[in-house]
Amino acid sequence: MLYPLKFRPVYKEIIWGGKNISKYFDRKTPYEKTAESWELCCRPDGMSVVDNGPLAGSSLSDIIEQYGEKLLGTECVKKYGSRFPLLIKYIDANDRLSVQVHPDDAYARKTGEENGKNELWYIVDAKPGAKLIYGLKKDITKDEFISAVKNGTVADTLRVVPVKPHDSLFIPAGTVHAILDGILIAEIQQNSNTTYRIYDWGRLGKDGKPRELHIDKALDVINFGGAAAEPQQDSGETQREILRSEFFNIDEVKLSGKLERNAEGKTLMVIMNLSGDIVISYDGGETPLKKGDTALIPASLGKYTLNGQSRLLMSWI
Ligand SMILES: [Zn+2]
C-alpha cells in the first residue's frame, strides 16, 4: 500500500554553493560547497530513493513502474504518461549563479534536447538587501544584447530586483535569470535540465577554465521585450495561491493546527515543509515531516491530515 513518501536528498556540489542548506535545515551535507539538494528527482543525473516505510530503498522510477497512476494520478498520467513531471530542489546561492535562460518544450525538442523548463523560485531565506536577476532591463533589443555579449557588458543589460524571504518568482522559459549571492531558494520546475548559459561573471570552473556558454541557443529563446513581472510577496493569508500554470500549480500554506486534505486520485501532491516539524496522518499511519523535509503524497492516498505549526509549499499537477 502507498503512503506519504520521503526521499534521501541528492546533493550536488557546484562552485557557487555553500553551507546554508545544512545550516538552515540542520542537515549533514557531504560537500564543502553544497549548491543544491534535489528533494524529488527522477532523472539519469539524480534519482530519488525512498527513505521511509516498507518501500525504503526503492527508487522513484521503480515505484512509478509498480504503482503508476495510483502514485502519479489520472490527470498527471494523461498529460505525461509514466514520466515524473517535476524536479524539486533547494538551492544555496552562496555566490552568484551564472546568467542563464531555458527553452520551452517546443524549442528543446526541435534541438534534440529533453524538455524545456519553466521554473518557480520561492525565497526560503535571504540576507538583508539580497537581489537577483529577473529578466532584462526594459526595452533591451536583441541587437543591443548581442553587442553587450561581444563587448563583455552583459551585466549592464540585466534587470536586478530585490527579494526577501517568502517572495516567489515564476521564471517562464525565455526569461533571462540568475540567483545572486546570499539566497536560499526552493525551486519547483519541469523535469528538465536544459540550460543555456549566457554569462558567468568572468569566473573559472573547478578545472581552471571558464564554463561553457551557449550564446546562439540563448539568443534563439530569449523573450526580448517581454513584460517584466514583479516578485510576488507574502499576502499575509493563511493559504496563498503562488502559481497556476499548465506545468504545475503551487500554494503556500501557513499551517497552524490541523488541515484536512483529500487525495482523490487525480494528481500527486508534493509538500515541502519550510519551517516547523509537522505530522501527516492518513488511514494506516503517520509520517513525521521535519523542517526542510519533502513528502510525496500519492494520488490515491485518500483523506489525510497535516498537523503542526509550519509554512508549507504544496505543488501539484
Ligand atoms: Zn534556471
Image: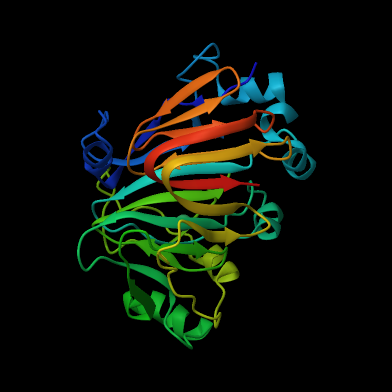
Does 25 sit left or right of 220 as displayed? left
Query: Which residue is at 51% across, 68% downward?
Result: 175
User: Residue 102, located in which quarter of the rendered image?
Assistant: bottom right
Count up the numbered dots. 0
Query: Which residue is at 27% across, 28% downward?
Result: 30
User: Residue 276, located in which quarter of the rendered image?
Assistant: top left
Q: Nearer the viewer, residue 281 or 97?
A: 281
Does 62 sit left or right of 132 as displayed? right
Quadrant of the snapshot with the N terminus: top right
- Can residue 193 be seen from the camera position used here? no
Query: Which residue is at 71% across, 58% downward?
Result: 106
- Please state the horizontal and vertical placement of residue 309, each as a whole percent of the image: 36, 42
The answer to whether 213 is drawn above or below residue 189 in the figure is below
Taking the view exactly as shown, the residue that stands out farthest to the front is 257
The colour scheme applied to this rendered structure is rainbow
The answer to whether 243 is drawn above or below residue 313 in the figure is below
- Please state the horizontal and vertical placement of residue 5, each as a whole percent of the image: 53, 25
- Please state the horizontal and vertical placement of residue 243, each as a whole percent of the image: 56, 60
Does 1 sit left or right of 147 as displayed? right
Taking the view exactly as shown, the residue that stands out farthest to the right is 78
- Please state the horizontal and vertical placement of residue 79, each as a whole percent of the image: 76, 45
Q: Nearer the viewer, residue 198 or 246?
A: 246
Taking the view exactly as shown, the residue that stands out farthest to the bottom is 139
The answer to whether 11 is drawn above or below residue 133 in the figure is above
- Can residue 130 be seen from the camera position used here? yes
Taking the view exactly as shown, the residue that stands out farthest to the top is 54
